[in-house]
Image (cartoon, rainbow, N blue to C red):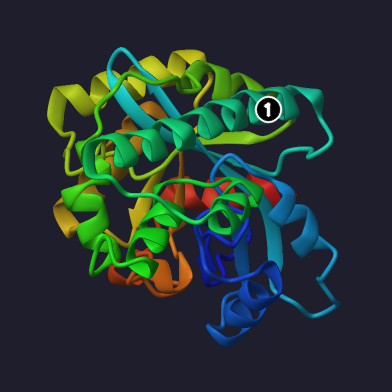
């Protein structure tokens, strides 16, 4: 089995809600000393396609990734996909479905801010917003700060955007998993203990989710994650071991949109990497 380099398999670029372009991200990855990384933009693969074209001999190993925003009767999930074929109709169909839902939610949020609070934005800002590859709440929050409707992005979320609880459409987790598998990829549940907003999922509820998703073809859990305390990390790693699932490690880096550093996965705090992450590394690199 191959030895494990310094890795970070969860990060975002300007193709979703990060602030680094793929070129800037590659530069930051090299500066952080990572040996392997994956770009996992929300519901988008265009950043991975662009980044692959930037790679040169001697650069860190790159694994194409994605993060689907999903929801079903048990709540919200983020499903990561790795080493898929970006030209596969299986994943492109799910991308088209998710993009349609995302654009619909964008309109609902803007309508809500206008109707409830009288927040309006110049037409040129709205055109730029709709031109984003995958616009979401962080992009709206930035506009709110720009026009003085909120002092900070956190306030924009807490006092306004997160108060909208209208029913909306999401890609279901089984659809995301099926699309990733159909494209030859490896589906992994991102930060399994985190649900909707500040929700923490533990115990039987967490295990129920894992069992449910495994039945759809889930192959791994993100056991090393920047936001996990040691007890949460050990809980997820034990579940992965119990069900024979792969383990991944990710920081969830968003550039200046989030106070997380590249490579901050928690894996260095462990005496030795979990067996599941070594199996994942072997599976995606051979």
* Vertical side of 128 occupied by 98: above or below: above
Q: Residues within 10 Å of mark 1 (few under 14, many from 20)?
A: few
Residue 72 position, x and y percent, is 37, 16
Residue 245 appears in the picture as rendered: no
What element does badge 1 sit on? helix
Front residue of this view, candidates 162 and 234: 162
Decide if residue 187 is on the left or right side of residue 241: right
Q: Quadrant of residue 87?
A: top right
Q: Quadrant of residue 183?
A: top right
Point out the image quarter for the N terminus: bottom right
Looking at the picture, how far across and down is residue 116, in whole percent?
23, 37
Label 1 sits on residue: 96
**What residue sits 39% from the left and 50% below the top?**
120
* 195 vs 283, nearest the viewer: 195
Q: From what the image shows, is residue 1 above or below residue 265?
A: above
> Where is residue 32 drawn, in percent x and y?
53, 83
Task: Tell me what residue is drawn at x 58 percent, y 65 percent.
Answer: 3
- Front one among 166 and 39: 166
Query: Is there any visible trace of residue 196 in the rendered image?
Result: yes
Q: Closest to the observer: 104 or 116? A: 116
Tally the numbered discs: 1
Residue pictured at 28% horizontal, 70% vertical:
269
Looking at the picture, how far across and down is residue 261, in whole percent? 40, 75
Q: Is residue 42 left or right of residue 150?
A: right
Residue drawn where x is 52% and y is 53% of the image:
278
Task: Decide: is 242 above or below 118.
Answer: above
Write down the quadrant of residue 114 in the picture. top left
- 136 with respect to 46 (left or right): left
């Amino acid at each position: 089995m191959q030895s494990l380099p310094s890795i970070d398999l969860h990060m975002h670029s300007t193709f979703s809600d990060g602030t680094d372009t793929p070129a800037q991200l590659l530069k930051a990855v090299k500066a952080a000393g990572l040996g392997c990384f994956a770009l996992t933009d929300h519901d988008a693969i265009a950043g991975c396609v662009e980044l692959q074209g930037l790679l040169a001999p001697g650069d860190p190993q790159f694994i194409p990734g994605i993060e689907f925003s999903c929801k079903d009767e048990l709540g919200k999930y983020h499903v990561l996909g790795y080493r898929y074929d970006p030209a596969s109709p299986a994943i492109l169909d799910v991308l088209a479905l998710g993009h349609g839902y995302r654009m619909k939610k964008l309109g609902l949020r803007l309508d809500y801010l206008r109707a409830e609070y009288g927040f309006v934005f110049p037409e040129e800002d709205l055109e730029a917003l709709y031109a984003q590859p995958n616009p979401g709440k962080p992009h709206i929050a930035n506009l709110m700060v720009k026009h003085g409707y909120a002092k900070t992005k956190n306030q924009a979320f807490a006092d306004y955007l997160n108060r909208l609880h209208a029913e909306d459409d999401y890609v279901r987790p089984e659809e995301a998993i099926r699309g990733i598998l159909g494209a030859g990829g490896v589906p992994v549940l991102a930060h399994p203990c985190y649900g909707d907003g500040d929700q923490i999922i533990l115990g039987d509820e967490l295990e129920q989710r894992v069992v449910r998703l495994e039945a759809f073809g889930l192959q791994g859990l993100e056991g090393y994650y920047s936001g996990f305390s040691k007890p949460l990390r050990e809980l997820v790693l034990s579940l992965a071991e119990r069900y024979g699932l792969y383990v991944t490690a990710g920081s969830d880096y968003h550039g200046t949109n989030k106070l997380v550093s590249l490579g901050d996965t928690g894996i260095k705090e462990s005496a030795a990497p979990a067996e599941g992450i070594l199996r994942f590394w072997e599976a995606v690199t051979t």
